[in-house]
Amino acid sequence: MEPRTDDLRINKSQPLISPAVLAGELPLPEGSAQFVQQARGTIENILSGNDPRILAIVGPCSVHDPAALLDFARQFKAGTDGLTDAIYPVLRVYFEKPRTIIGWKGLINDPDLDNSFQINKGLHLARQVLLDVADIGLPAANEFLDNTLGQFYADIVSFGAIGARTVESQIHRELASGLSMPVGFKNGTNGDVGVAIDAIRSAGHSHWFPSLTKEGVPAILRSTGNPHSYLILRGGGETGPNYEAVHIQGAAAELEAQGLARSVIVDCSHGNSGKDPARQADVMYSLCEQIAAGEDAIRGIMLESHLVAGNQKVVDGVAETYGQSITDACLALADTLPLLEQLAETLGQRYQL
């Protein structure tokens, strides 16, 4: 017999729904499509410096309970409705989680939190969540980890992110070059800002890359390049935090040297907080001081926040705490809103908003 040489380590497969079928089952209403289009334009104007407001991307580390996420969304919107002259609130809606070794990979990969990996169910849940968020009246931000899954729901996403683990990946740079929304690139996990600036430059160019069509057919797609790609500072394991004035000014100078927008988004969590959610407040205080002193390169902030502070482990037979993260620890929404109020007040005093 001829020896078998393929799929030697694949022992199971299941059919994957096509993006077009999923969109047919969960269509994007015309009103919501207009909302997403307008939100993307607003975010582009803020990050390019044509709108003096600051982008505020806030929400749980990851979505594991859609009901709690939507509860957070409603309270977040209500708590920021009076601040929109100065800040533009966007809900963090992350469905995929990069893992250092192994662990729960997010709502799409394992929606039942039991290692059953019902990915088609996860895709349905993810798209429905985004439709519900748009119906609430909030733009959604999402990290793109798998380079094909975006075809299932990217039409409802207003801001995309490429994470610190994938910022050096050519595949993700190509993906970003074809995304229909503004995209933020995080600095590397070690704190290297240069790789993110390289990614921004790469995403601005046209690329050919393999992906899926909306019909679910493998295809080679050609992008036109994404002119709205921006830098996210999130600190690093080797460099430490990078949110203080010297870091903001240095990053802005590097961007300008490459002919890119002098525009920085600061992630108050991760390396900038040492993964201590309470220290996100320290980052915000520093950013407010810099803005008050005239720094105009700070165009956006990111906060990890949920209904309940901290995080929890999923344990069989033990009831979960409603509204608490099962991945990175978060700041409670009740402690987050005062930070956003302070940011709005700082912007208002500076720009007379």
Image (cartoon, helix red, strand yellow):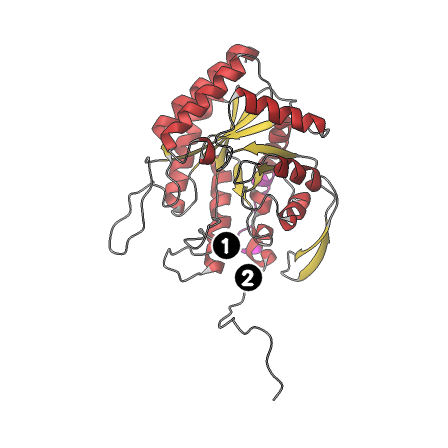
Label 2 packing within 10 angstroms: few (<14), some (14-19), many (20+): some
SS type, badge 2: loop
Res 17 label: 2
Magenta segment:
24-33
x then y, percent, for residue 332? 35, 32
Residue 163 is one of the magenta-drawn residues: no
**Quarter of the N terminus within the rendering:** bottom right
**Quarter of the C terminus within the rendering:** top right
Q: Is residue 106 left or right of residue 208?
A: left
Q: Is residue 193 left or right of residue 331?
A: right
Label 1 packing within 10 angstroms: few (<14), some (14-19), many (20+): many
Number of marks present in the image shown: 2
Looking at the image, is mark 2 or mark 1 earlier in the sequence?
2
Q: Amino acid at mark 2?
A: Ile
Q: Amino acid at mark 1?
A: Leu
Query: Distance from label 2 to label 1 (Cα)?
Result: 9 Å
SS type, badge 1: helix
Residue 27 is one of the magenta-drawn residues: yes
x then y, percent, for residue 252? 63, 25
Q: Which residue shows up at 41% across the image and 53% down it?
A: 104
Residue 170 or residue 37, whichever sits in front: 170
Q: Which residue shows up at 57% across the image and 55% down it?
A: 24
Residue contact between numbered discs 2 and 1, judged by CB atoms under 8 Å:
yes
Residue 261 at least partly seen: no
Residue 115 at least partly seen: yes
Residue 142 or residue 123, whichever sits in front: 142
Q: Which residue shows up at 60% across the image and 40% down it?
A: 33
Is 97 located above or below residue 261 in the figure? Answer: below
Query: What residue sits right under mark 1 in the picture?
Result: 123
Q: Which residue shows up at 41% across the image and 34% down it?
A: 274
